[in-house]
Image: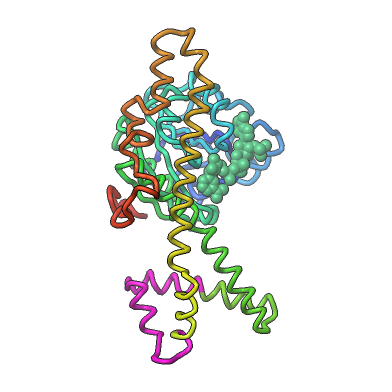
């Protein structure tokens, strides 16, 4: 018996990320294939999913949503207005919507779907091989049981961390969500440096990838601060000391910090733009459909209880006016896999 036993899961936007979740859930025995239904507009994609996972597929998003307990939303952000308007009216109050859409705040999601039980999650690329880290926030309407279900589903993508403040999802977008980009760039730069030294490219690749993987595992297993690990291998007058001098002279730490702040600022901008475009797409309905449509439009701008944490004045200040320390650990519930 697991948190997902007997539950039906629908995926809307059944692309790379949704498939990683489907594969992980079935692989881990959390759901059986007959409990998963994926919608996709393209028949060849539907056949692909059926063949690979033995699940049921449908062409219409609304058809997938109707019989489900949990709806995984894996569409691209630009499809949210269209798909949200399509499936929103079909959602029942007790259903959980779990979104992996980058930048889609709960205000945007609850507004466009007109549905209060929503989880906003931010996975990262290694989720595709079950080694990602996902930070997630649930609106107050999401029940304790649905939070357990969310944790179980996201565990299929790797480590999951629930936070009780939505701002932390935006912050995580800049750290873990965008994190693989930083690592891939460092990886590429080190490979190129090794080639410059004279290694064949495939050898350079293996040396660098194994070094990064081994170092990450060592840091994890030793549970020692990275500075301590670095000190352990930095002999007086040695090679590490010479290399570190160059890295510090090149402002590596500062550049990485600036990159994280830039990604955070951009996340907020994109979230604001998405909310504004969704609110604009609902505006004619608000003008003509009376109080309930107007309330939904207001929710999209952060007016609903679920929307409070995203774009209200309580959001983390942008870089220009913010202090820079001590924010990362706030609000995390530590529900690690
Ligand atoms: N991939 C990652 O590593 C990652 C990491 C963090 C967050 N995310 C977020 O996860 C979401 C999905 O990303 P992804 O990489 O899985 O993208 P993806 O592979 O493009 O998946 C989206 C799927 O939605 C389908 N689709 C298009 N229009 C649709 C409609 N009207 N109704 C239903 N489905 C429709 C697309 O079909 P077509 O193939 O025909 O276009 C595609 O299969 C994005 O919002 C992204 O921000 C992804």
Q: Is residue 15 visible?
A: no
- Magenta stretch encompasses residue 229: yes
| Picture colour scheme | rainbow
Residue visible at 58% across and 78% down in the picture: 207
Q: Name the foreground residue: 333 vs 264.
A: 264
Q: Name the foreground residue: 174 vs 15.
A: 174
* Number of disc labels: 0
**Residue 205 sits above or below residue 279 on the image:** below
Query: Where residue 147 appears, x then y in whole percent?
Result: 34, 40
Q: Quadrant of the C terminus?
A: bottom left
Residue visible at 47% across and 55% down in the picture: 132
Locate residue 13 relative to residue 236 in the image: left or right: right
**Residue 23 sits above or below residue 99 on the image:** below
**Residue 290 sits above or below residue 234 on the image:** above
- Magenta stretch encompasses residue 300: no
Q: Quadrant of the N terminus?
A: top left
**Within the image, what quadrant is residue 231 found in?**
bottom left
Stretch of the chain drawn in magenta:
212-240
Locate residue 135 relative to residue 33 in the image: left or right: left
Magenta stretch secondary structure, dominant: helix
Q: Is residue 260 visible?
A: yes
Query: Where residue 163 appears, x then y in whole percent?
Result: 32, 46
Query: Where residue 70 appears, x then y in whole percent?
Result: 44, 33
**Residue 101 sits above or below residue 197 on the image:** above
Query: Where residue 267 appears, x then y in whole percent?
Result: 47, 44
Locate residue 34 relative to residue 151 in the image: left or right: right
């Amino acid at each position: 018996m697991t948190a997902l036993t007997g539950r039906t899961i629908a995926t809307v936007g059944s692309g790379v990320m949704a498939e990683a979740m489907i594969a992980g859930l079935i692989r881990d025995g959390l759901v059986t294939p007959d409990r998963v239904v994926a919608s996709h507009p393209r028949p060849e994609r539907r056949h692909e999913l059926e063949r690979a996972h033995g699940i049921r597929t449908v062409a219409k998003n609304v058809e997938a949503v109707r019989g489900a307990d949990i709806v995984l939303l894996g569409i691209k952000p630009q499809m949210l207005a269209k798909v949200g308007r399509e499936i929103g009216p079909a959602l029942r109050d007790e259903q959980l919507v779990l979104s992996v859409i980058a930048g889609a705040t709960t205000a945007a999601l609850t507004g466009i779907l007109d549905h209060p039980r929503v989880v906003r999650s931010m996975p990262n690329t290694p989720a595709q091989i079950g080694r990602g880290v996902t930070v997630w926030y649930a609106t107050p309407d999401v029940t304790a049981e649905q939070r357990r279900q969310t944790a179980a589903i996201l565990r299929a993508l790797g480590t999951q961390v629930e936070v009780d403040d939505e701002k932390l999802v935006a912050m995580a977008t800049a750290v873990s969500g965008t994190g693989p980009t930083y690592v891939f760039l460092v990886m590429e730069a080190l490979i190129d440096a090794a080639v410059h030294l004279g290694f064949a490219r495939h050898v350079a690749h293996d040396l660098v990838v194994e070094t990064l993987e081994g170092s990450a595992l060592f840091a994890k297993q030793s549970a020692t601060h990275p500075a301590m690990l670095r000190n352990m291998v930095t002999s007086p007058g040695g090679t590490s000391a010479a290399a570190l001098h160059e890295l510090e002279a090149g402002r590596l730490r500062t550049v990485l910090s600036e990159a994280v702040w830039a990604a955070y600022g951009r996340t907020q901008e994109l979230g604001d733009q998405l909310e504004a475009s969704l609110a604009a797409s609902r505006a004619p309905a608000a003008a003509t459909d009376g109080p309930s449509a107007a309330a939904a439009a207001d929710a999209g701008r952060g007016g609903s209880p679920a929307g409070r944490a995203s774009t209200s004045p309580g959001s983390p200040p942008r870089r220009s006016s913010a202090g820079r320390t001590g924010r990362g650990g706030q609000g995390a519930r530590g529900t690690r896999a």
